[in-house]
Image: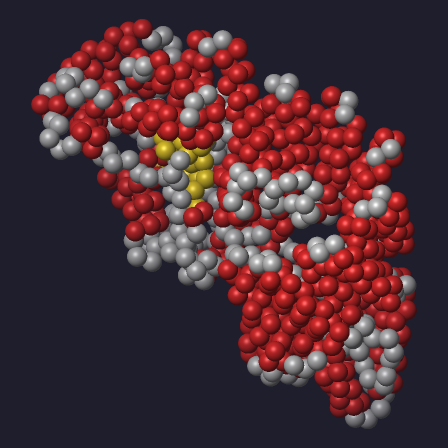
Amino acid sequence: MSEADIHVENTITGGIFFQAVVQGRDITVQLPREITPALSGLPSPAAAFTGRDNLVDVLLADLDPEREHAARVSVVAGLAGVGKTELALQVAAQARRRPGWFPGGVLFVDLFGYSPDLRVSPASALAGMLGALAIPGEHIPAAVEDRERLYRSVLAHYAQQGQRILVLVDNASTAEQARPLLPTDGATAALVTSRHTLDGLDVRMYDLGSLDEEASVGVLDQALRHSRGEHDTRFTDDMAAAGEIARLCAGLPLALRISAALLAASPLRPASSVADALRAEHGRLDALRRPDRAVRAAFDLSYGLLDDERASLFRLLPLPSGPDLSTEAVAHLYGTDVQRAENILHRLAEAHLVDSGPVWGRWRMHDLVRLYARELHQELDDQETSRASLDRLCKHYQRTAAAASSHLQVLPIRPVSELFAGSTEALYWLDAERRNLLAMVALIWDTGRIEATRTLAGSLALYLHWRRHLPDAVETARYAVAAAQASGERAHEAAALVDVAVGLQELRQYDEADDLYIRAVGMFRELGDRWGEATALINHGTNQRRLGRLKEAAATHTACLHLFHDLDDPVGMATALTGLGRTLLDQRDFDGSIAAHQQAVAIHRSLSNGLSEAGALDRLGLTLQEIHRYVEAADSHGRAAEIYRSLGHHHGEAVASNNLGLALRELERYDESLEAHSRAREIFRSLTDKNSEAEAQGNRGTVLRMLQRVEEAVEAHTEAVDAFHETMDKNNEALALVNLATDFYEQGEHQTAEPLFSQAVSLFRGTGNRQGEGQALNNLGLNLGMLHRGQEAVDALTRATAIYAELGDQYMQKVTRHNLKLVSRASKRPGWRARLAQRIGDALREREGSG
């Protein structure tokens, strides 16, 4: 689909031009048909849990959607190891099972607020949570305040649609870290855990104390029976020893479970032996230690029972600074095979020194355990052990990230790795490891691994853009720039500068991107790297086009074309031709645009480059639509869809089918158009591409309007307006408003249409989209004329004319002047409203749905 540019005519007949806008990026918040893994990946509650029944009931009452005056946000505070997270998990699990309470699932995030290496910022947490809520990456704003507003509005939308969500925010260290993640709609509920009382939050606060002796003994007994079976009664058989263990563990569930694990590991060991060991360990602890000294005593005892293999691996686990580790990563960190690593990890999990993650094959550590293991590593392991372990893990990440990235490349610049079966498997690995990979880039840079920093950061560039993790893409590429500068590798520095610029360009930071492109092009020229220069220029030309510097963009793409020609690189030539074609289209040089795209198609076809040929054909079809050559356009889109289908490229097929629907609609082949859009929608849905699915659905709505199914059209456009407002995509919200206003206009509901057109004008002005503002003003003026508000109509059309004069759009200037004259004259003659309505209606029927 095109970017919803304004439709044009080459001549003006006697009618009035009234634009009906096609939304180029129609996005709605599509609620999942079933709970997604991101909304159901809650860590498993512990089997041993007791002594908290009263607080569980109170927290559940706060979450009850039917209870009036309930606190929708509750914070549980208490010292480390007291069981805050476990309490929250138990409550969330019970609430999730209550019919109708949280049909939308549970959104869980660990902020690692007390771990400096892992601490998650509100901006990062919001990005992850918005992704879990099915918001496309390109619509997640950069500023934390904007993410916060979007996040809250999406949660409210889920609640309104009967998909209420429970948000569980674990390990918040400050009110500032937690506040942006808390819902404010009065329906969505949240649980927060922290070691501190989070002052300044308008929430219900609960302090969690240690368990009393009876409850502590209950945890010990439950944990032992869960591990060894109901027949193991060693704690209840020796209540004195069990009570002493409970007191020595200070009623902290983490210490209690570790103590029970000590007994479970030795079937013949009596409870009194564990009590004796804990008593002795306490005596060796510094009296000035934190209140969690009971946990440290349990750590020491548990660690003391590890054999050398498990102990050495345990000490290595905190070395990486990511939130968790896969079994495969642990194997590389330790220098063993995956099966052996998994066996060791399971033994550590039995001792409660590591925890299994929410999905199989991933492992994490309690932050206190992580600190404990790190202290032991610093005390017992030499620097050579640390260096070698980190090097092994780094090489694993480098090799695997490069292999995964090879499956994402558009052109076969390098061989595709056989390490992954395809792009789906590669993306799955990258998604699972993203936070670890980003943390590894920062860590290896900090530890002086310059070459590794550059290569790992470079391997992640394509993936981060693919998944639209644009702020991460920019930050990671900056590491690559720094590494290249440190090693004096100017060619790599120039390439990394392009990666930074591309990210900034997608974040609409065009001016900074422009400066970086200029630097990169200059560096490539100094190095005599003409291919690098041409590649940077292609991206620079696209950025210039987005800045509205169309003459410069055309010159840049032309220079690229000559460079690739001299390099005898036909693929580069075709790519440059495509960029030039898009720029010429914006300049309304339709013949030039068509010629450029046709040349690109011919080159790709001669090289049997089917995917690129299909892409060029699809873009050619969009250009042909701009000059009303709809039969040829439909043929071009149809051929593109067929090529994509034959190659099994489902996403490309869906895009081409969606565009085919636009051409068929202009040919008044509405049933075929509806079928094409429906096919595109279903493919996008199967690929979980919510953005494109919504776009196709929006186009279906426009066809339905033409079939006089107006209520369905209004519903579709209203949903689009709401969705764009929630995602803060103001430009597309304005486009959707124009479409919605047109729905009402056609039904003669001019009073309803007027504020919608006015709002679109305001939004376009705010985004700097002068073309859109001019078109919305044109439409507003015509609608005001129908309301007998002649002077306001004249004012709106005069402003539209001025904008088009400023833009140098002579055709639209003629259109608005024509409309201005007609409105001015018609308002002075009897029966003008009927004649105006007739002429506008005729124009709409001629140009319905053009974009």
The correct choice, above or below, for 86 with respect to 270 in the image is below
Dividing the picture into quadrants, the one containing residue 666 is bottom right
Looking at this rendering, what residue extends furthest in the top direction?
Answer: 284
Residue 412 coordinates in the image, percent (x, y): 68, 45
| Residue at image location 76% in from the left, 57% down from the top | 606
Looking at this rendering, what residue extends furthest in the left direction?
Answer: 237
| Residue at image location 87% in from the left, 33% down from the top | 528
Dividing the picture into quadrants, the one containing residue 793 is bottom right
| Residue at image location 16% in from the left, 32% down from the top | 229
The residue closer to the viewer here, 180 or 622, is 622
Residue 534 coordinates in the image, percent (x, y): 83, 43
Residue 385 coordinates in the image, percent (x, y): 49, 13
Q: Is residue 800 left or right of residue 108?
A: right
The residue closer to the viewer here, 841 or 33, is 33
Q: Is residue 31 left or right of residue 456?
A: left
Q: Is residue 279 left or right of residue 106?
A: left
User: Is residue 533 in view from this perspective?
Assistant: yes
User: Is residue 717 in view from this perspective?
Assistant: no
Residue 129 coordinates in the image, percent (x, y): 51, 45
Looking at this rendering, what residue extends furthest in the bottom direction?
Answer: 830
The residue closer to the viewer here, 566 or 553, is 566
Give the colouring mode of the picture: secondary structure
Please state, as top left, top right, bottom left or bottom right, where the C terminus lies in the image.
bottom right
The residue closer to the viewer here, 336 or 762, is 336
Dividing the picture into quadrants, the one containing residue 350 is top left
| Residue at image location 28% in from the left, 35% down from the top | 46
Please state, as top left, top right, bottom left or bottom right, where the N terminus lies in the image.
bottom right
How many numbered marks are there? 0
The correct choice, above or below, for 701 with respect to 103 in the image is below
